[in-house]
Amino acid sequence: MSIDACELCPVREHALCSCLNDEERIILSSLSQRRRLMAGETVMWAGDESRICANLQSGVLKVVAATTDGREQIVSLVYPADFVGEPYTTEIAFTVTALSDAELCTFPRLLFERFLEEHARMGNLLLQRTLGALKDARTRMLTLARLSAGEKVAGLLLDMAVRAGRHSYLPDQSEPVTFDLPMTRGHMADVLGMTIETVSRQLTKLKSAEVVVLSGARTITIVDGNALKKRAMAA
Amino acid sequence: MSIDACELCPVREHALCSCLNDEERIILSSLSQRRRLMAGETVMWAGDESRICANLQSGVLKVVAATTDGREQIVSLVYPADFVGEPYTTEIAFTVTALSDAELCTFPRLLFERFLEEHARMGNLLLQRTLGALKDARTRMLTLARLSAGEKVAGLLLDMAVRAGRHSYLPDQSEPVTFDLPMTRGHMADVLGMTIETVSRQLTKLKSAEVVVLSGARTITIVDGNALKKRAMAA
DNA sequence: GAACCGCCTTGATCTGGATCAAGGATCTGC
DNA sequence: GCAGATCCTTGATCCAGATCAAGGCGGTTC
């Protein structure tokens, strides 16, 4: 363990700790433990005791809500620099699993909470991020409950285009954009609250309508962004 | 305006400001403005500038997400002592409307944010409440996306029983419990992401199965709490 | 007490998406 | 480059819940 373990951190400019000065950051770093995950590995299980919080350094995680009889819903996707975990909670409510290989910078929950309380700027930043996550969750409630399958898929493709293009996919883009879908049909279905078959059929429909081109199952080109937006249409 | 306007506040022991000492509370109070709402009146409109935050003193509010073409989803219900508003946001994302007559203690957003930053204990409390709201929203995402109509209605009845009974409706209650439904069939449908007709039919089904007794449209007795729980079943 | 209005129930019908079923494409390891 | 495992597509059928339609309560107003 080097004196300053954050030196090489790929997300040091964007994670929660980016608001700290060197001195504070070194204190926080002394509480941290790096953890490497394989794709498919689970970070925390619903029902377990809430023991850690973490910043994601690389990879993508899913946060899953499930019924006792096994129906599942992905309630959030976690990207690098995002915060994961359930502070101020004793029992984990949602299972968190790696979709790809991933790296985490973890903290024991109680120490993390104490640190938050003693470093108000970071507490405030986490508040802002949590408010953002809440807005996202509520927006997705509308999607899940009221949009049609076609609207859901079109909206997800637009979201993924924005993320894939590092925010270069502007709202009124009219140039074709090509990127790789970052998830399987199954994950899309889990995010959108539908089945694999319906996702697939909607993609086929977009292809037939020449709104997108699919080159193999995972590479997509959005040919007519405006048409896609028209099909997404949620506020 | 009295020297200490909080004296008579019905939620002073439970709202965010309950963590403040007298001195701090008086400062916050000096920023506040009381607002009285009629049932049906809207507090803030999606799309407007985010100008105020507030604590609810009495009544019940709904927070609504809507598509551009008018489909709506209630994403949250706000009860006395709860916080309302969208701090750290310039544009309101969700319309907030009173379901009953209501009273608010409002603050200009920017002053409220500054106060939060200068009073870390309250900032931390708002963080905890926001984390709770996030958990609630994510749980409801599972409900909206994966539960059947029967499961949704049973679950909502249980939630309402807990709230109506001031937390006296224990998880393993086996005594009948009677209370008034705090909302119309239409609001239940908006909360659960379904139609009025389906809510009504599910209630009729519960009545036929002698799980509940309906005395008039608004008074309900849960006769067989365990059967109701079996029908709700989400984790 | 008649007319009205908002809320609720019930019935008949329709339909979007789930479910069931059968391959076809891609990728992996050897 | 072949065997096996995933992942994806497409077709056929089914069904839960939406939609369309028609009254039935209670309350309130005058």
Image (cartoon, coloured by chain):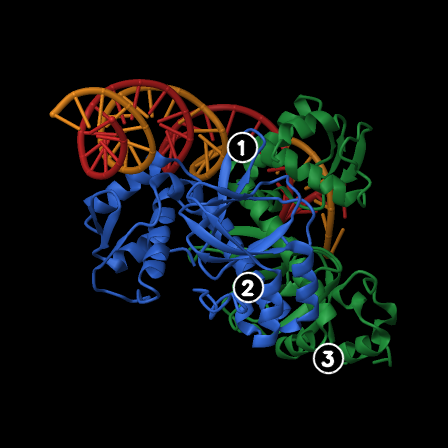
Chain colours: A green, B blue, C orange, D red
Per the image, label 3 sits on a secondary structure element best described as: helix
Q: Which mark is residue A31?
A: 3
Residue A21: x and y, percent?
84, 73
Residue A222: x and y, percent?
75, 31
Identify residue type, mark 2.
Arg
> Picture quarter containing residue C26?
top right
Pointer 3 chain: A
Q: Is residue A61 above or below residue D25?
A: below
Q: Which residue is mark 2?
A: B129
Q: Let me know if residue A18 appears in the view.
A: yes
Identify residue type, mark 3.
Leu
**Dividing the image into 4 quarters, which one contains the C terminus of chain A?**
top right
Q: Is residue A5 above or below residue A102?
A: below
Q: CA distance from mark 3 to mark 2?
A: 25 Å
Q: Which residue is mark 1?
A: A148
Q: CA distance from mark 2 to mark 1?
A: 32 Å
Residue B111: x and y, percent?
68, 59
